[in-house]
Amino acid sequence: MARETFQVGDLTAVIGDNEAYAGHRAGYNGVHRLTHRTNPKSLFTITGLNFEHIFDGDHDLRGDVKVTFEPRNAPITFTKISESEAELHQPPTPTFHLESWTRFKLAAPHYIDFTFRCKPHQHVFSHGYIGLFWASYIDAPENKSIYFRDDRGWVQLCTQTHNDESTVLHVADKTQLQFMPNTRPMLYKSVSPLRFSDPLYYGLFGSHQYILMFDRTEGIRFSHSPSGGGPPSAPQPAWDWQFIIPEYEVAKEYSYRARAVYRERCSQDEVLEEFKRWRSALAK
């Protein structure tokens, strides 16, 4: 068990590995709690920015829950780097032999910068691609939707049920993933007819707003569940995403960067300004 509480600017975050402790369920890594100076209620229920699935459309669908949720079950090492930064390291996992590093860094006034790196160690992905999936379980927002942009403007998405047209691809994403037939439904198997243009989305949480944005469009997909995997009446939606590596090489490192913003509510214009400022800073 390893975790730490970080307080930077308006945010307080508990970041930790996937072991249980009082008030936290086993299997969930990432940001266990996230609160804002002006809202003591945690945005997340179980956890957020949680590495949930490694998938190849075969091993993950055979019925072994420990494989389907391998990042939950394989050991993770937590390292506190500074008063604002921590890293989770997962050694090569038992089934997919994927090693990964996830780094979180809080920045004032209301940001969590997220860097993910991974390295496949064996040729075990049945269909030639690597699929990676993250989940954030939101604590009963009145509005379960996420909002993103297509090539004409803002689009609202709130799926009707879990695994129903759950995944949104980029407008230029032509990658068609293969899955073993007649296997269990999953969020990443069910594709929405909607498409995003800019790699960001946001959701509303009372008087506050959560924005997630990425440093690229290649390989990024958004996912949504209105119930976090529970029955349709469950009040906790999941605002999720994926990183797809269509073709991979063993021992080669793959990565991307993201920024989570948790702030008091703002306009859609300000959401875009947050995105533009961050992307400009990355380019320097």
Image (cartoon, helix red, strand yellow):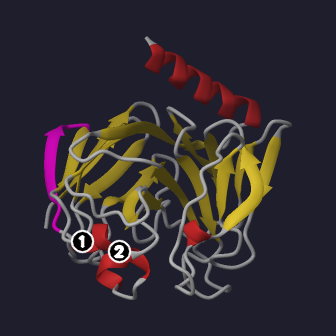
Relative depth, front residue between 271 and 186: 186
Q: Where does the magenta region start and end? A: 75-84
Q: Residue reaching furthest top?
A: 284
Where residue 40 appears, x then y in whole percent?
46, 58
Residue 48 image-quadrant placement: bottom left
Report the residue at 63% width, 76% height from top. 163
Query: Which residue sits at x=31%, y=77%?
Result: 67
When the figure is inspected, residue 57 is found, relative to residue 42, above or below; the finding is below
In whole angstroms, how far apart are the C-alphas of marks 1 and 2?
Answer: 11 Å
Q: Which mark is residue 277?
A: none
Q: Is residue 130 magenta?
A: no
Which residue was labeled with disc 1?
A: 95
Mark toward the viewer: 1 or 2: 1
Looking at the image, can residue 206 be seen?
A: no
Task: Say which amino acid is labelled 2.
Answer: Phe
Secondary structure type for disc 1: loop
Vertical comparison of 127 with 235: above or below: above
Dot 1 alpha-carbon crowd within 10 angstroms: few under 14, some 14 to 19, many 20 or more: some
**Would you say residue 79 sits in the magenta stretch?**
yes
Bin the neighbour count of mark 2 within 10 Å (Cα to Cα): few under 14, some 14-19, many 20 and up. Answer: some
Front-most of residues 178 and 60: 178
Q: Which residue is mark 2?
A: 69
Evaluate whether residue 30 shows in this view.
Answer: yes
Residue 115 as seen in the image, left or right of residue 204: left
